[in-house]
Amino acid sequence: MTEVDASHAGPALEWDTPLFRMASAQFQQALPYCGVSDMVAERLSYPERAVIVSVPLRRDDGSIQIFPGYRVQHSTVLGPTKGGLRYDPHVDLGECAALATWMTWKCALLQLPYGGAKGGIRVDPHGLTPRELEKLTRRFTSELVREIGPQSDIPAPDMATNEQTMAWIMDTYSMLKGYAVPEIVTGKPISLGGSLFRREATGAGVVMVTEQAGRRQGWELAGKACVVQGFGNVGGVAASELHDRGARVVGVSDISGGLYSQAGLDVPALHAYAAAHGSLEGYDLCERITNEQLLELPCDVLIVAAREDQLHADNAPRVQAAMIVEGANGPTTLEADEIFRERGIPVVPDILANAGGVTVSYFEWVQDLGRLFWDRDEIRRKLADKMGTAFDRVFSVAEEKGITLRQAAMVAAIRQVAAALEARGIYP
Ligand code: NAD
Protein backbone atom coordinates (compact mmCIF):
# COMPACT_ATOMS: atom_id res chain seq x y z
CA MET A 1 0.00 0.00 0.00
CA THR A 2 1.20 3.53 -0.79
CA GLU A 3 2.23 5.48 2.28
CA VAL A 4 0.60 8.85 2.76
CA ASP A 5 2.14 11.78 4.56
CA ALA A 6 -0.91 13.39 6.14
CA SER A 7 0.95 16.37 7.60
CA HIS A 8 1.03 19.66 5.76
CA ALA A 9 3.49 22.22 7.03
CA GLY A 10 2.49 25.72 8.09
CA PRO A 11 -0.71 27.30 9.38
CA ALA A 12 -4.21 25.93 8.88
CA LEU A 13 -5.53 26.07 5.32
CA GLU A 14 -7.85 28.95 4.42
CA TRP A 15 -11.08 26.92 4.49
CA ASP A 16 -10.33 25.58 7.98
CA THR A 17 -13.33 27.16 9.79
CA PRO A 18 -15.74 25.65 12.38
CA LEU A 19 -18.24 24.48 9.73
CA PHE A 20 -15.53 22.85 7.62
CA ARG A 21 -14.12 21.21 10.77
CA MET A 22 -17.61 19.84 11.43
CA ALA A 23 -17.80 18.31 7.93
CA SER A 24 -14.27 16.90 8.41
CA ALA A 25 -15.16 15.43 11.82
CA GLN A 26 -18.20 13.66 10.35
CA PHE A 27 -15.92 12.21 7.65
CA GLN A 28 -13.37 11.08 10.26
CA GLN A 29 -16.11 9.49 12.42
CA ALA A 30 -17.33 7.42 9.46
CA LEU A 31 -13.88 6.34 8.22
CA PRO A 32 -13.32 3.44 10.67
CA TYR A 33 -16.43 1.73 9.21
CA CYS A 34 -15.54 2.33 5.55
CA GLY A 35 -12.53 0.08 4.99
CA VAL A 36 -10.88 2.54 2.59
CA SER A 37 -7.15 3.06 2.00
CA ASP A 38 -5.11 5.87 3.56
CA MET A 39 -4.73 7.37 0.08
CA VAL A 40 -8.50 7.66 -0.34
CA ALA A 41 -9.03 8.99 3.18
CA GLU A 42 -6.37 11.66 2.79
CA ARG A 43 -7.32 12.77 -0.73
CA LEU A 44 -11.01 13.16 0.11
CA SER A 45 -10.22 15.26 3.19
CA TYR A 46 -9.50 18.29 0.99
CA PRO A 47 -11.55 20.15 -1.60
CA GLU A 48 -9.85 19.88 -5.00
CA ARG A 49 -10.22 23.55 -5.91
CA ALA A 50 -11.31 26.81 -4.29
CA VAL A 51 -11.75 30.12 -6.08
CA ILE A 52 -12.24 33.58 -4.57
CA VAL A 53 -13.32 36.47 -6.76
CA SER A 54 -14.20 40.08 -6.03
CA VAL A 55 -17.38 41.14 -7.74
CA PRO A 56 -17.85 44.86 -8.46
CA LEU A 57 -21.38 46.24 -8.58
CA ARG A 58 -22.48 49.69 -9.75
CA ARG A 59 -25.36 50.45 -7.36
CA ASP A 60 -28.50 52.21 -8.58
CA ASP A 61 -27.20 55.46 -7.00
CA GLY A 62 -24.04 55.29 -9.15
CA SER A 63 -21.62 54.20 -6.37
CA ILE A 64 -19.44 51.09 -6.76
CA GLN A 65 -19.36 48.34 -4.14
CA ILE A 66 -17.21 45.19 -4.20
CA PHE A 67 -18.49 41.85 -2.86
CA PRO A 68 -16.42 38.70 -2.24
CA GLY A 69 -17.57 35.65 -4.21
CA TYR A 70 -16.57 32.00 -3.78
CA ARG A 71 -16.75 28.66 -5.54
CA VAL A 72 -15.36 25.47 -4.02
CA GLN A 73 -15.22 22.15 -5.90
CA HIS A 74 -14.66 19.23 -3.56
CA SER A 75 -14.35 16.16 -5.80
CA THR A 76 -14.34 15.39 -9.53
CA VAL A 77 -13.79 11.66 -9.03
CA LEU A 78 -17.27 10.62 -10.18
CA GLY A 79 -17.99 13.40 -12.70
CA PRO A 80 -18.56 17.16 -12.88
CA THR A 81 -19.18 19.00 -9.62
CA LYS A 82 -22.65 20.15 -8.66
CA GLY A 83 -23.94 22.48 -5.99
CA GLY A 84 -25.81 25.61 -5.10
CA LEU A 85 -24.94 29.29 -5.05
CA ARG A 86 -26.13 31.31 -2.03
CA TYR A 87 -26.34 35.04 -1.39
CA ASP A 88 -25.91 35.59 2.33
CA PRO A 89 -23.85 37.84 4.67
CA HIS A 90 -22.28 34.72 6.29
CA VAL A 91 -20.81 33.19 3.10
CA ASP A 92 -17.09 32.43 3.44
CA LEU A 93 -14.57 29.96 2.06
CA GLY A 94 -14.98 27.51 4.96
CA GLU A 95 -18.76 27.46 4.66
CA CYS A 96 -18.51 26.78 0.91
CA ALA A 97 -15.87 24.07 1.50
CA ALA A 98 -18.05 22.32 4.10
CA LEU A 99 -21.16 22.51 1.94
CA ALA A 100 -19.20 21.31 -1.13
CA THR A 101 -17.91 18.33 0.85
CA TRP A 102 -21.45 17.41 1.95
CA MET A 103 -22.57 17.67 -1.68
CA THR A 104 -19.97 15.06 -2.66
CA TRP A 105 -21.40 12.62 -0.11
CA LYS A 106 -24.99 13.46 -1.06
CA CYS A 107 -24.40 12.85 -4.78
CA ALA A 108 -22.53 9.62 -4.05
CA LEU A 109 -25.24 8.37 -1.70
CA LEU A 110 -27.88 8.93 -4.38
CA GLN A 111 -25.55 7.33 -6.97
CA LEU A 112 -25.49 10.44 -9.16
CA PRO A 113 -22.45 10.90 -11.47
CA TYR A 114 -21.29 14.08 -9.72
CA GLY A 115 -18.97 15.41 -7.06
CA GLY A 116 -19.81 18.29 -4.76
CA ALA A 117 -19.41 22.05 -5.15
CA LYS A 118 -20.80 25.13 -3.43
CA GLY A 119 -20.41 28.85 -3.81
CA GLY A 120 -21.95 32.19 -3.25
CA ILE A 121 -21.52 35.88 -2.66
CA ARG A 122 -21.09 37.49 0.77
CA VAL A 123 -23.91 40.01 0.50
CA ASP A 124 -27.19 40.88 2.19
CA PRO A 125 -29.48 40.25 -0.78
CA HIS A 126 -32.36 42.12 0.87
CA GLY A 127 -30.30 45.31 0.70
CA LEU A 128 -30.16 45.19 -3.13
CA THR A 129 -32.79 46.06 -5.73
CA PRO A 130 -33.78 43.45 -8.36
CA ARG A 131 -31.76 45.38 -10.95
CA GLU A 132 -28.67 45.33 -8.70
CA LEU A 133 -29.12 41.60 -8.01
CA GLU A 134 -29.24 40.93 -11.74
CA LYS A 135 -26.03 42.91 -12.40
CA LEU A 136 -24.26 41.24 -9.46
CA THR A 137 -25.27 37.77 -10.70
CA ARG A 138 -24.17 38.47 -14.27
CA ARG A 139 -20.78 39.82 -13.20
CA PHE A 140 -20.26 36.89 -10.77
CA THR A 141 -21.03 34.49 -13.64
CA SER A 142 -18.47 36.12 -15.91
CA GLU A 143 -15.86 35.99 -13.10
CA LEU A 144 -16.51 32.22 -12.81
CA VAL A 145 -16.70 31.45 -16.53
CA ARG A 146 -13.47 29.44 -16.47
CA GLU A 147 -14.58 27.41 -13.44
CA ILE A 148 -18.14 26.44 -14.31
CA GLY A 149 -19.43 24.48 -17.31
CA PRO A 150 -21.94 21.73 -18.17
CA GLN A 151 -19.17 19.11 -18.07
CA SER A 152 -17.14 20.65 -15.22
CA ASP A 153 -19.29 22.41 -12.58
CA ILE A 154 -23.04 23.01 -12.69
CA PRO A 155 -24.52 25.60 -10.25
CA ALA A 156 -28.04 25.50 -8.78
CA PRO A 157 -30.11 27.68 -6.43
CA ASP A 158 -29.51 27.80 -2.69
CA MET A 159 -30.34 30.34 0.03
CA ALA A 160 -31.72 33.58 -1.48
CA THR A 161 -31.11 32.49 -5.06
CA ASN A 162 -33.89 31.13 -7.26
CA GLU A 163 -35.09 30.34 -10.79
CA GLN A 164 -34.58 33.95 -11.86
CA THR A 165 -30.96 33.90 -10.63
CA MET A 166 -30.36 30.70 -12.63
CA ALA A 167 -31.94 32.31 -15.72
CA TRP A 168 -29.48 35.25 -15.46
CA ILE A 169 -26.55 32.83 -15.11
CA MET A 170 -27.73 30.74 -18.07
CA ASP A 171 -28.16 33.86 -20.21
CA THR A 172 -24.78 35.35 -19.26
CA TYR A 173 -22.93 32.07 -19.85
CA SER A 174 -24.75 31.54 -23.17
CA MET A 175 -23.88 35.10 -24.31
CA LEU A 176 -20.20 34.49 -23.52
CA LYS A 177 -20.25 31.16 -25.43
CA GLY A 178 -22.31 32.44 -28.37
CA TYR A 179 -25.06 29.80 -28.19
CA ALA A 180 -27.73 28.68 -25.71
CA VAL A 181 -26.36 26.41 -22.96
CA PRO A 182 -29.35 25.46 -20.77
CA GLU A 183 -27.40 22.61 -19.13
CA ILE A 184 -25.01 25.09 -17.41
CA VAL A 185 -27.39 25.44 -14.43
CA THR A 186 -30.25 23.53 -12.89
CA GLY A 187 -33.25 24.92 -11.03
CA LYS A 188 -33.96 27.32 -13.92
CA PRO A 189 -37.40 28.27 -15.29
CA ILE A 190 -39.28 25.59 -17.25
CA SER A 191 -39.29 27.92 -20.28
CA LEU A 192 -35.45 27.68 -20.41
CA GLY A 193 -35.24 23.90 -20.07
CA GLY A 194 -35.90 23.65 -16.35
CA SER A 195 -37.42 20.46 -15.05
CA LEU A 196 -40.96 19.99 -13.86
CA PHE A 197 -41.00 19.21 -10.11
CA ARG A 198 -37.53 20.70 -9.47
CA ARG A 199 -38.92 23.47 -7.25
CA GLU A 200 -40.80 20.98 -5.06
CA ALA A 201 -38.17 18.22 -5.19
CA THR A 202 -36.19 18.92 -2.00
CA GLY A 203 -39.22 19.39 0.26
CA ALA A 204 -41.01 16.44 -1.33
CA GLY A 205 -37.92 14.26 -0.87
CA VAL A 206 -37.69 15.29 2.79
CA VAL A 207 -41.23 14.04 3.34
CA MET A 208 -40.63 10.82 1.32
CA VAL A 209 -37.79 9.82 3.67
CA THR A 210 -39.75 10.96 6.74
CA GLU A 211 -42.57 8.64 5.67
CA GLN A 212 -40.18 5.73 5.10
CA ALA A 213 -38.43 6.31 8.44
CA GLY A 214 -41.83 6.31 10.18
CA ARG A 215 -42.79 3.04 8.52
CA ARG A 216 -39.53 1.49 9.72
CA GLN A 217 -40.63 2.45 13.23
CA GLY A 218 -44.14 1.11 12.65
CA TRP A 219 -46.15 4.31 12.19
CA GLU A 220 -47.77 6.29 9.35
CA LEU A 221 -47.57 10.07 8.87
CA ALA A 222 -51.34 10.71 8.93
CA GLY A 223 -52.30 12.35 12.21
CA LYS A 224 -48.69 12.74 13.42
CA ALA A 225 -47.65 16.08 14.97
CA CYS A 226 -44.94 17.71 12.83
CA VAL A 227 -42.89 20.91 13.30
CA VAL A 228 -41.05 22.59 10.43
CA GLN A 229 -38.36 25.25 10.91
CA GLY A 230 -37.92 27.41 7.77
CA PHE A 231 -40.75 28.23 5.37
CA GLY A 232 -38.79 28.71 2.15
CA ASN A 233 -38.20 26.39 -0.77
CA VAL A 234 -37.51 23.35 1.42
CA GLY A 235 -39.57 23.95 4.58
CA GLY A 236 -42.57 25.49 2.81
CA VAL A 237 -42.91 22.56 0.41
CA ALA A 238 -42.26 20.02 3.17
CA ALA A 239 -45.07 21.59 5.24
CA SER A 240 -47.45 21.30 2.25
CA GLU A 241 -46.46 17.69 1.56
CA LEU A 242 -47.02 16.79 5.24
CA HIS A 243 -50.38 18.56 5.20
CA ASP A 244 -51.37 16.71 1.99
CA ARG A 245 -50.57 13.38 3.66
CA GLY A 246 -52.85 14.15 6.60
CA ALA A 247 -50.10 14.96 9.11
CA ARG A 248 -50.80 17.71 11.67
CA VAL A 249 -48.35 20.57 11.07
CA VAL A 250 -48.43 22.06 14.59
CA GLY A 251 -45.54 24.52 14.18
CA VAL A 252 -43.72 26.36 11.41
CA SER A 253 -41.30 29.29 11.43
CA ASP A 254 -39.30 31.61 9.25
CA ILE A 255 -36.79 34.33 10.02
CA SER A 256 -39.62 36.44 11.53
CA GLY A 257 -40.44 33.83 14.21
CA GLY A 258 -42.69 30.82 14.77
CA LEU A 259 -46.37 29.91 14.63
CA TYR A 260 -48.05 27.22 16.73
CA SER A 261 -51.41 25.46 16.81
CA GLN A 262 -51.95 22.22 18.72
CA ALA A 263 -54.83 21.33 16.36
CA GLY A 264 -52.67 21.85 13.27
CA LEU A 265 -51.95 24.96 11.18
CA ASP A 266 -53.77 25.85 7.96
CA VAL A 267 -50.73 25.37 5.69
CA PRO A 268 -52.37 26.59 2.43
CA ALA A 269 -53.45 29.79 4.26
CA LEU A 270 -49.85 30.30 5.48
CA HIS A 271 -48.56 29.98 1.91
CA ALA A 272 -51.14 32.47 0.67
CA TYR A 273 -50.11 34.88 3.46
CA ALA A 274 -46.36 34.46 2.78
CA ALA A 275 -46.90 34.97 -0.97
CA ALA A 276 -48.82 38.19 -0.31
CA HIS A 277 -46.52 39.60 2.43
CA GLY A 278 -43.10 38.17 1.59
CA SER A 279 -42.85 36.28 4.91
CA LEU A 280 -44.96 35.00 7.84
CA GLU A 281 -44.36 38.22 9.78
CA GLY A 282 -47.64 39.59 11.13
CA TYR A 283 -49.72 36.43 10.65
CA ASP A 284 -51.97 36.42 13.71
CA LEU A 285 -54.54 33.64 13.23
CA CYS A 286 -52.68 31.38 15.69
CA GLU A 287 -50.25 31.57 18.61
CA ARG A 288 -46.89 33.26 17.87
CA ILE A 289 -43.74 31.74 19.40
CA THR A 290 -40.00 32.27 18.99
CA ASN A 291 -37.77 30.11 16.82
CA GLU A 292 -36.11 28.81 19.98
CA GLN A 293 -39.47 27.67 21.38
CA LEU A 294 -40.40 26.10 18.05
CA LEU A 295 -37.40 23.77 18.12
CA GLU A 296 -38.36 22.57 21.60
CA LEU A 297 -42.06 21.80 20.90
CA PRO A 298 -43.22 18.26 21.73
CA CYS A 299 -43.82 16.50 18.38
CA ASP A 300 -43.41 13.25 16.46
CA VAL A 301 -41.25 14.79 13.72
CA LEU A 302 -39.08 17.93 13.75
CA ILE A 303 -37.94 19.01 10.28
CA VAL A 304 -35.14 21.58 10.43
CA ALA A 305 -35.16 23.32 7.04
CA ALA A 306 -33.73 26.81 7.62
CA ARG A 307 -29.93 26.86 7.90
CA GLU A 308 -26.90 25.33 9.62
CA ASP A 309 -26.16 25.19 13.39
CA GLN A 310 -29.78 25.33 14.63
CA LEU A 311 -29.62 22.31 16.99
CA HIS A 312 -26.65 22.67 19.33
CA ALA A 313 -25.38 21.66 22.77
CA ASP A 314 -27.61 24.28 24.49
CA ASN A 315 -30.99 23.34 23.04
CA ALA A 316 -30.47 19.64 22.15
CA PRO A 317 -31.25 18.42 25.72
CA ARG A 318 -34.60 20.25 25.56
CA VAL A 319 -35.70 19.00 22.12
CA GLN A 320 -38.87 16.92 22.56
CA ALA A 321 -39.21 15.47 19.03
CA ALA A 322 -39.38 11.69 18.59
CA MET A 323 -37.47 12.01 15.28
CA ILE A 324 -35.45 14.79 13.60
CA VAL A 325 -35.17 15.16 9.83
CA GLU A 326 -32.55 17.50 8.38
CA GLY A 327 -34.05 19.48 5.49
CA ALA A 328 -31.26 22.09 5.76
CA ASN A 329 -27.57 21.36 5.33
CA GLY A 330 -25.64 21.00 8.59
CA PRO A 331 -28.43 22.07 11.01
CA THR A 332 -27.15 19.80 13.83
CA THR A 333 -23.78 20.43 15.48
CA LEU A 334 -21.50 17.53 16.43
CA GLU A 335 -22.31 18.08 20.12
CA ALA A 336 -26.07 18.00 19.48
CA ASP A 337 -25.67 14.87 17.35
CA GLU A 338 -24.02 13.12 20.29
CA ILE A 339 -26.78 14.28 22.67
CA PHE A 340 -29.47 12.92 20.32
CA ARG A 341 -27.60 9.61 20.02
CA GLU A 342 -27.48 9.30 23.82
CA ARG A 343 -31.15 10.24 24.10
CA GLY A 344 -32.14 7.71 21.40
CA ILE A 345 -33.64 10.34 19.06
CA PRO A 346 -32.95 9.31 15.45
CA VAL A 347 -31.62 12.03 13.15
CA VAL A 348 -32.28 11.44 9.44
CA PRO A 349 -29.18 13.20 8.04
CA ASP A 350 -29.08 16.02 5.51
CA ILE A 351 -27.17 14.11 2.85
CA LEU A 352 -30.08 11.67 2.67
CA ALA A 353 -33.08 13.79 3.69
CA ASN A 354 -32.56 16.81 1.43
CA ALA A 355 -31.08 14.94 -1.56
CA GLY A 356 -34.30 15.27 -3.57
CA GLY A 357 -33.16 18.64 -4.91
CA VAL A 358 -29.88 17.51 -6.43
CA THR A 359 -31.54 14.33 -7.70
CA VAL A 360 -34.10 16.25 -9.75
CA SER A 361 -31.32 18.68 -10.73
CA TYR A 362 -29.55 15.65 -12.17
CA PHE A 363 -32.77 14.74 -14.02
CA GLU A 364 -32.91 18.32 -15.33
CA TRP A 365 -29.32 18.16 -16.62
CA VAL A 366 -29.94 14.79 -18.29
CA GLN A 367 -33.12 16.13 -19.94
CA ASP A 368 -31.26 19.27 -21.15
CA LEU A 369 -28.37 17.24 -22.59
CA GLY A 370 -30.81 14.89 -24.33
CA ARG A 371 -33.19 17.73 -25.33
CA LEU A 372 -35.98 15.35 -24.26
CA PHE A 373 -38.37 16.22 -21.43
CA TRP A 374 -40.29 14.02 -18.99
CA ASP A 375 -43.66 14.66 -17.37
CA ARG A 376 -44.23 15.44 -13.71
CA ASP A 377 -45.46 11.97 -12.73
CA GLU A 378 -42.43 10.31 -14.31
CA ILE A 379 -40.06 12.66 -12.44
CA ARG A 380 -41.84 12.15 -9.12
CA ARG A 381 -41.73 8.36 -9.62
CA LYS A 382 -38.03 8.41 -10.54
CA LEU A 383 -37.29 10.59 -7.49
CA ALA A 384 -39.21 8.25 -5.18
CA ASP A 385 -37.21 5.28 -6.58
CA LYS A 386 -33.85 7.02 -6.01
CA MET A 387 -34.74 8.25 -2.52
CA GLY A 388 -36.12 4.81 -1.58
CA THR A 389 -32.96 3.00 -2.70
CA ALA A 390 -30.70 5.43 -0.83
CA PHE A 391 -32.87 5.19 2.28
CA ASP A 392 -32.70 1.36 2.27
CA ARG A 393 -28.90 1.46 1.85
CA VAL A 394 -28.52 3.83 4.80
CA PHE A 395 -30.79 1.87 7.10
CA SER A 396 -29.22 -1.48 6.28
CA VAL A 397 -25.66 -0.12 6.90
CA ALA A 398 -26.86 1.40 10.20
CA GLU A 399 -28.39 -1.89 11.32
CA GLU A 400 -25.48 -4.03 10.13
CA LYS A 401 -22.84 -1.87 11.87
CA GLY A 402 -24.88 -0.58 14.82
CA ILE A 403 -24.08 3.07 13.95
CA THR A 404 -26.14 6.26 13.61
CA LEU A 405 -28.01 7.08 10.42
CA ARG A 406 -25.55 9.92 9.73
CA GLN A 407 -22.56 7.63 10.07
CA ALA A 408 -24.29 5.00 7.91
CA ALA A 409 -25.11 7.55 5.19
CA MET A 410 -21.48 8.74 5.24
CA VAL A 411 -20.15 5.16 5.07
CA ALA A 412 -22.34 4.31 2.04
CA ALA A 413 -21.33 7.55 0.30
CA ILE A 414 -17.60 7.37 1.07
CA ARG A 415 -17.41 3.78 -0.18
CA GLN A 416 -18.99 4.85 -3.48
CA VAL A 417 -16.41 7.59 -4.10
CA ALA A 418 -13.56 5.48 -2.71
CA ALA A 419 -14.20 2.63 -5.17
CA ALA A 420 -13.92 5.07 -8.08
CA LEU A 421 -10.84 6.81 -6.65
CA GLU A 422 -9.07 3.49 -6.04
CA ALA A 423 -9.76 2.51 -9.66
CA ARG A 424 -8.61 5.87 -11.05
CA GLY A 425 -5.60 6.31 -8.73
CA ILE A 426 -3.69 9.52 -8.17
CA TYR A 427 -2.61 11.36 -11.34
CA PRO A 428 0.13 11.23 -12.60
P1 NAD B 1 -34.88 29.66 1.37
O1 NAD B 1 -34.10 30.92 1.36
O2 NAD B 1 -35.91 29.42 0.31
O3 NAD B 1 -35.65 29.50 2.78
C1 NAD B 1 -35.02 29.58 4.00
C2 NAD B 1 -36.11 29.75 5.07
O4 NAD B 1 -35.54 29.69 6.36
C3 NAD B 1 -36.86 31.07 4.98
O5 NAD B 1 -38.22 30.87 5.31
C4 NAD B 1 -36.16 31.93 6.06
O6 NAD B 1 -36.99 32.97 6.54
C5 NAD B 1 -35.93 30.85 7.09
N1 NAD B 1 -34.87 31.17 8.05
C6 NAD B 1 -33.63 31.67 7.83
N2 NAD B 1 -32.95 31.78 8.99
C7 NAD B 1 -33.79 31.33 9.95
C8 NAD B 1 -33.68 31.19 11.35
N3 NAD B 1 -32.56 31.54 11.99
N4 NAD B 1 -34.73 30.66 12.01
C9 NAD B 1 -35.86 30.27 11.36
N5 NAD B 1 -36.03 30.40 10.04
C10 NAD B 1 -35.01 30.93 9.35
O7 NAD B 1 -33.80 28.50 1.41
P2 NAD B 1 -34.03 26.97 1.06
O8 NAD B 1 -33.71 26.75 -0.38
O9 NAD B 1 -35.34 26.52 1.60
O10 NAD B 1 -32.83 26.30 1.89
C11 NAD B 1 -32.95 26.02 3.28
C12 NAD B 1 -31.86 25.04 3.66
O11 NAD B 1 -31.99 23.85 2.87
C13 NAD B 1 -30.43 25.53 3.44
O12 NAD B 1 -29.61 24.93 4.43
C14 NAD B 1 -30.08 24.93 2.08
O13 NAD B 1 -28.67 24.78 1.91
C15 NAD B 1 -30.78 23.60 2.20
N6 NAD B 1 -31.06 22.93 0.92
C16 NAD B 1 -31.80 23.54 -0.05
C17 NAD B 1 -32.08 22.85 -1.23
C18 NAD B 1 -32.96 23.44 -2.30
O14 NAD B 1 -33.25 22.73 -3.29
N7 NAD B 1 -33.45 24.66 -2.15
C19 NAD B 1 -31.57 21.56 -1.43
C20 NAD B 1 -30.83 20.96 -0.41
C21 NAD B 1 -30.59 21.66 0.76
Image (cartoon, grey):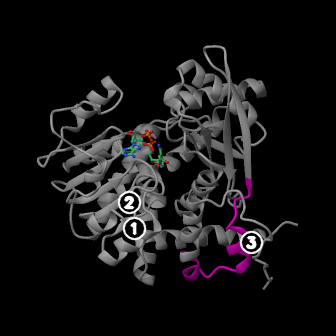
Q: Please give the label number shown on residue 311.
A: 2
Label 2 residue SS: loop
In this rendering, the label closer to the viewer, 2 or 3: 2
Total marks placed = 3
Between 131 and 31, the one lying in front of the other is 131
In the displayed structure image, the side of residue 189 where residue 266 appears, left or right: left
Q: Give the quarter of the image for residue 64.
A: top right
Location of the N terminus by quadrant is: bottom right
Question: Magenta residues?
Answer: 30-49
Amino acid type at image mark 3: Ala
Q: Give the quarter of the image for residue 15.
A: bottom right
Between 402 and 181, the one lying in front of the other is 402
Give the labeled residue for mark 3: 423
Q: Is residue 91 above or below residue 100?
A: above
Judged from the image, the quadrant occupied by ligand 1 is top left
Alpha carbons under labels 2 and 1: distance apart = 6 Å
In the displayed structure image, the side of residue 102 where residue 2 appears, left or right: right
In this rendering, the label closer to the viewer, 1 or 3: 1
Between 342 and 293, the one lying in front of the other is 293
Label 3 residue SS: helix
Between 157 and 335, the one lying in front of the other is 335
Disc 2 and disc 1 in contact, CB within 8 angstroms: yes
Alpha carbons under labels 2 and 3: distance apart = 39 Å
Residue 45 magenta-highlighted: yes
Q: Are there few (<14), some (14-19), or many (20+) residues within 10 Å of tag 1?
A: many
Q: Is residue 295 above or below residue 424?
A: above
Q: Are there few (<14), some (14-19), or many (20+) residues within 10 Å of tag 3?
A: few
Q: Earlier in the sequence, mark 2 or mark 3?
A: 2
The location of residue 427, given as percent across then percent down, is 84, 66
